[in-house]
Image: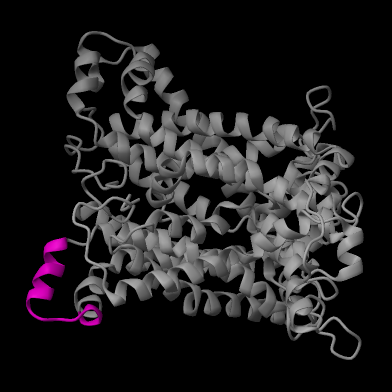
């Protein structure tokens, strides 16, 4: 990510540069247009837009649609559902992936290659390839008392498991490459001193992987939050849906007009955008770390 | 397996120096002899638990898809599974009116993404790589669509395409009787409408990948090229672009996978009805739709699996060879 806001050598103003900036400004605005349109629609009362049409000068801009969308549909509840899924899924993925990575990068290099192949290939598969048996499996697994539905199907646990399984391969791979770059003396000295393997992992290697973990954590949070497919297929009760599939469920039910739909969609996007703005660098470095992955 | 972008930052240089080769086949390396029994058990757990979870939920289900594709099953009880050989495939290829359109749309999806937003993303990356002011701001604008959930993207674009209240029809006055354009319902239009939304997202994604790739281009190469009197386009064509080869490979694979995975946008848009059928949608409709034909759905999944593996395996083999040489 270049922070070319302040360059050391300010280039003199050239017509070509001015043209380039003009082009970029116009294109960037065109890119933001659909979002700005959604914001504009969400800020206007439905009565006014249906009366004057959507392309018209607004008489009144208000946040009413946002508050209505949020309260009527009980959006907070669905954000909560997403949180219950995403937080454990991200933490578990990082934990499991870093454990595998630790093992293959420190103890067994031959496995590293097998891991690469199995995990990465699994991670690149379209989800729809495995959904039919997975769906059946989730219906078969009885968990009386463990989940609300009594099955893996239609439960937060089920979504957490598939997220962890699907994403841990990719993270394990990235982390194992990262760990291989740490000097070997670090862990070997600890071994000679009689530190246990777990201590080596937990107190020596893991703290050194913070940058990679932060990047992957950011990426995972956004991916899992944004997930729509698993949530649509593996959750059937509206009450249990995370925010993305709930949005699909609510539109038409609570979000009765385009202005409310716009507000609901924008509200759904806010957490991701916030995470992105706060952790931009981590997100982008994570994405380029994982450039080899869909 | 990452394209080696900038060796200066440890995060991007994912191809590390080769580890000391394990001494011989099965004999543990020096320090491994120091492991206590407890350590060995710990290690077995550390490697085993995640691997079992991944293999069970991803690979065994993929294998189950293949097995079920040759059966007929309504999902009620295991004793109702019937072996039907190639019947599902025969039906799929010959008398499913949605199958070939879906294959065609998946192909179109890929072709459009690789021909339009991908080069555009590269173009943006090249422009933004020039140390210009506000580069960060521009990048963010192009990148926002990548961060948003595809489901949200689908809703946002519905507001643009809505035949009655949408931006396009309101601006061009196509929402009055007689001038009506139905961007979502018209089977000749809706695939292209969805593809505009998909491209909107894809361009930013490609821009980021190319920006990372461009960082790895040695500046002295460009200087040498400029000294030789090459203009900007010549430098890009003859010097910069050839060094982007690893990035191009990644971009190609990512784009193919994106085209095979395409689902969310279409589902939100019109559930993959007339005109926007995709393989992923057909499979899903077989589960959450009214017909629960498991064998049939699995047969479509096998088609998707075969196409995916035809891309994934050569790519991984190539990457893996590079790793060994590294």
In the rendered image, residue B284, in percent from the top left (x then y), is placed at 75, 60
- Residue A163 at x, y = what percent? 61, 41
Image x and y of residue B224, in percent: 8, 71
Q: Nearer the viewer, residue B304 or B164?
A: B164
- Magenta span includes B232: yes
Q: Is residue A11 left or right of residue A83?
A: left
Magenta-drawn segment: B219-234
Question: Of B172 and B25, which appears nearest the observer?
Answer: B172
Going by the image, does A268 lie left or right of A75?
left
Q: How many marks?
A: 0
- In the image as oriented, which residue stretches furthest toward the bottom? B178
Task: Indicate the quadrant where residue A259 lies.
Answer: bottom right
Q: In the image, what residue occupies the spot 29% across and 46% down?
A: B14
Query: Is A25 situated left or right of B316 in this image?
Result: right
Q: Is residue A138 magenta?
A: no
Residue drawn where x is 49% and y is 36% of the image: A217
Check the image and report above or below for A119 versus B222.
above
Find the residue positioned furthest to the top: A194
Asked whether B3 or B292 is in front, the reply is B3
Query: Is B278 situated left or right of A255 in this image?
Result: left
Q: Quadrant of residue A161?
A: top right
A98 vs A10, nearest the viewer: A10
**Residue A252 visible (yes or no):** yes
Residue A107 seen anywhere in this rendered image of the structure: no
**Considering only vertical position in the picture, is A90 above or below B101?**
above
Residue at x 33% of width, y 68% of height: B126
Residue B102 image-quadrant placement:
bottom right
Q: Main secondary structure of the magenta part?
A: helix
Residue B67 x, y percent position in the rendering: 67, 58
Q: Is residue A105 above or below residue A7?
A: above
Above or below residue B153? Residue A193 is: above
């Amino acid at each position: 990510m270049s922070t070319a806001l302040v360059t050391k050598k300010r280039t003199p103003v050239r017509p070509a540069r001015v043209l380039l900036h003009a082009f970029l400004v116009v294109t960037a605005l065109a890119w933001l247009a659909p979002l700005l349109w959604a914001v504009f629609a969400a800020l206007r009362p439905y009565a006014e837009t249906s009366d004057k049409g959507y392309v018209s000068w607004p008489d009144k801009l208000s946040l009413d649609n946002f508050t209505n969308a949020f309260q009527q549909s009980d959006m907070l509840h669905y954000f909560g559902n997403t949180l219950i899924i995403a937080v454990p899924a991200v933490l578990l993925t990082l934990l499991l992936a870093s454990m595998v990575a630790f093992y293959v990068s420190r103890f067994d290099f031959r496995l590293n290659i097998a891991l690469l192949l199995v995990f990465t290939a699994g991670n690149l598969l379209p989800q729809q390839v495995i959904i039919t048996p997975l769906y059946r499996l989730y219906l078969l697994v009885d968990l009386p008392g463990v989940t609300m539905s009594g099955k893996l199907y239609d439960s937060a646990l089920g979504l957490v498991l598939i997220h962890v399984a699907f994403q841990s391969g990719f993270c394990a791979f990235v982390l194992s490459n990262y760990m291989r770059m740490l000097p070997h003396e670090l862990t070997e000295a600890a071994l000679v001193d009689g530190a246990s393997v777990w201590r080596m992992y937990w107190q020596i290697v893991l703290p050194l992987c913070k940058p990679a973990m932060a990047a992957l954590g950011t990426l995972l949070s956004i991916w899992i939050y944004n997930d729509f497919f698993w949530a649509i297929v593996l959750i059937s009760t509206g009450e249990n849906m995370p925010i993305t599939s709930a949005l699909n469920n609510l539109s038409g039910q609570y979000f009765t007009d385009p202005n409310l739909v716009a507000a609901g969609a924008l509200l759904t996007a806010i957490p991701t955008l916030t995470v992105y703005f706060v952790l931009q660098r981590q997100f982008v470095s994570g994405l380029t770390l994982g450039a080899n992955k869909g | 397996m990452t394209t080696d972008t900038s060796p200066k930052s440890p995060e991007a240089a994912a191809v590390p120096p080769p580890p000391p080769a394990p001494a011989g086949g099965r004999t543990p390396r020096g320090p491994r002899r120091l492991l206590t029994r407890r350590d060995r058990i710990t290690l077995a757990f550390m490697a085993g638990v995640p691997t079992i979870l991944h293999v069970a939920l991803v690979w065994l289900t993929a294998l189950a898809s293949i097995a079920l594709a040759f059966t007929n099953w309504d999902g009620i009880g295991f004793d109702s599974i019937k072996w039907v050989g190639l019947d599902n495939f025969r039906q799929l290829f010959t008398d499913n009116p949605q199958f070939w359109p879906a294959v065609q749309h998946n192909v179109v999806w890929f072709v459009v993404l690789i021909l339009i937003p991908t080069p555009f993303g590269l173009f943006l990356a090249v422009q933004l790589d020039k140390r210009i002011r506000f580069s960060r701001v521009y990048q963010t604008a192009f990148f926002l669509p990548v961060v948003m959930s595809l489901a949200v993207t689908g809703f946002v674009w519905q507001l643009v395409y809505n035949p009655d209240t949408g931006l396009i029809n309101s601006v061009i006055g196509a929402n009055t009787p007689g001038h009506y354009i139905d961007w979502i319902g018209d089977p000749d239009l809706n695939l292209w409408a969805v593809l505009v939304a998909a491209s909107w997202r894809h361009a930013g994604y490609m821009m980021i990948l190319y920006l990372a790739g461009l960082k790895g281009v040695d500046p002295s190469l460009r200087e040498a090229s400029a000294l030789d009197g090459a203009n900007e386009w010549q430098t890009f064509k003859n010097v910069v672009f050839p060094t982007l080869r690893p990035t191009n490979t990644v971009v190609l694979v990512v784009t193919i996978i994106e085209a095979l995975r395409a689902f969310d946008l279409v589902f939100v848009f019109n559930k993959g009805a007339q005109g926007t059928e995709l393989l992923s949608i057909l499979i899903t409709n077989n589960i959450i739709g009214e017909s629960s034909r498991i064998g049939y759905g699995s047969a479509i999944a096998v088609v998707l699996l075969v196409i995916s593996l035809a891309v994934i395996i050569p790519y991984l083999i190539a990457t893996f060879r590079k790793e060994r040489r590294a």
